Amino acid sequence: MTRLFLRAVKMARHQLQNIKGAFTASLGVIIIGGVTLSLSPQTLASSSPTITLIIDDIGYNLRNGLRAVNLPGAVSYAILPHTPYSQRLAKTAHQQGKTVMLHAPMTNVHQRSPGPGTLSPSMDRETFDQELKKALADIPFVQGVNNHMGSELTQDSIRMQWLMEEVSKRRLFFIDSRTTAKSVAAKTARSNGIPSMSRDVFLDHIRTPEAVSEAFDTLIRQAKRNGHAVGIGHPHSVTLDMLEARLPELRAQGIRLISVPDQLLAMGQVYQDIQPAFVAPQTTPPARSPAFWRSEIQQLTRYKEADVTHPKIIRKDVIIRKETLDRHQINRNEKEAVQRQQLLPEIPEGTEFPKLKVQQPSNDQAERDMSLQPVHQPGWLTPKENQSWTTPVNNTPLAK
């Protein structure tokens, strides 16, 4: 009985320690064997709520489009094809490291015009593919696709399959704007293995400062409740005013603003066969100690510069070859010399020129001048200390 009692007490104590460890870990502290370890901010950041923000309908208004592109943080931009400023704003967003998406126009149940490049259920496969490819070609640096309007077309499972086949072929991601609860776009994307998400909150469905701010509060609450939320806004002045004021406040509230590709990677949504196009591979060159370079240079100093056959000289990770003169520069210098000669007056034959007297320096002066000359090492002896192997991409919105 005594042994059973002691064993039960030991098990209860072990369970209490586990509960205590889980509770302290949630506060950023882990207790192991009586030793307290604090978690780093990077570790805690991985569990903090995140928001992904997309600005739709970019391309018609340059002023508001530039305001949107200059929003702080990792905001993503869905750009309408064949619009006056689509390419300019896409390039500007890409230069600032922002995510660029195609805002693909699709038919809606309200029979309102989505604009040029509209995809509709009446199209056959060939016409559908042609319009989609033209729209993708019009947006430079495109990384993903979402639907503009589309409350009718996103219910068409056949044409959504056509769309996802092209998206998958180009290794893009897809975001379902969910302009209708009957949309099958996100389901079709997942069935094709495409990294995808769906919209949670429209920020400016009602365009008043109070309504837009309340929608942003809803986005934050959903992020805190679910861990992540996707918000979609438009380049209206009331929306941009609110975002310019409130986006910098997210960090103080414990919210991280991350791009669409980063959130998809955090969710483990990637193409299984190859690395996604929006992931930049990173490589780290091997570290070399100063003693290694001193040893290499001491060995190389025994050989002449012309001795390029020596194995130490032809190793690319040890030395830099001496750069040869650029042939184009030589040709240009020769051309300038000929032009200068053509500008000189012709000198009659037999003309005698006075000889110039050159004063030879004394031996003491020559030795003194030589001692003042700096000692230069050949360029091919210079080690590559920072070598890298990486390989060197009327403003009235249309109703949903």
Image (cartoon, grey):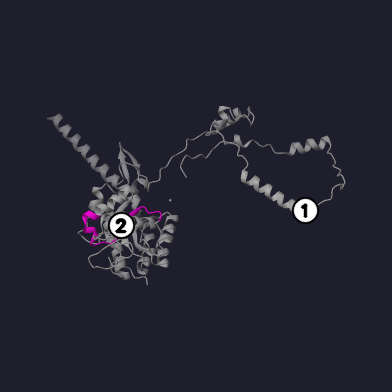
- Whether residue 47 is visible: no
Check disc 2: other Cα within 10 Å, few if <14, some if 14-19, many if 20+.
Answer: many
Q: Nearer the viewer, residue 270 or 375?
A: 270
Q: Give the farthest residue toward the bottom.
A: 394
- Whether residue 120 is visible: yes
Position in image of residue 190 (x %, y %): 25, 49
Q: Is residue 203 left or right of residue 345?
A: left
Which is in the foreground here, disc 1 or disc 2? 1
Above or below residue 58? Residue 344 is above
Q: Is residue 380 left or right of residue 399?
A: right
Q: Nearer the viewer, residue 204 or 256?
A: 204
Residue 225's quadrant in the figure?
bottom left
The residue that disc 1 covers is 344
The residue that disc 2 covers is 146
Q: Is residue 63 left or right of residue 326?
A: left
Amino acid, disc 1: Leu
Q: Secondary structure at mark 2?
A: strand
Magenta-colored stretch includes residue 143: yes
Position in image of residue 217 (x %, y %): 29, 62
Q: Which image quadrant: the C terminus?
A: bottom left
Please give the range of residues in magenta. 140-159
Position in image of residue 231 (x %, y %): 30, 59
Check disc 1: other Cα within 10 Å, few if <14, some if 14-19, many if 20+.
Answer: few
Above or below residue 345? Residue 63 is below
Amino acid, disc 2: Asn
Above or below residue 112? Residue 130 is above
Position in image of residue 381 (x %, y %): 60, 34
Mark earlier in primary sequence (1, 2): 2
Q: Secondary structure at mark 1?
A: loop
Q: Residue at x 15, y 29 (%)?
A: 3
Q: Nearer the viewer, residue 305 or 369?
A: 305
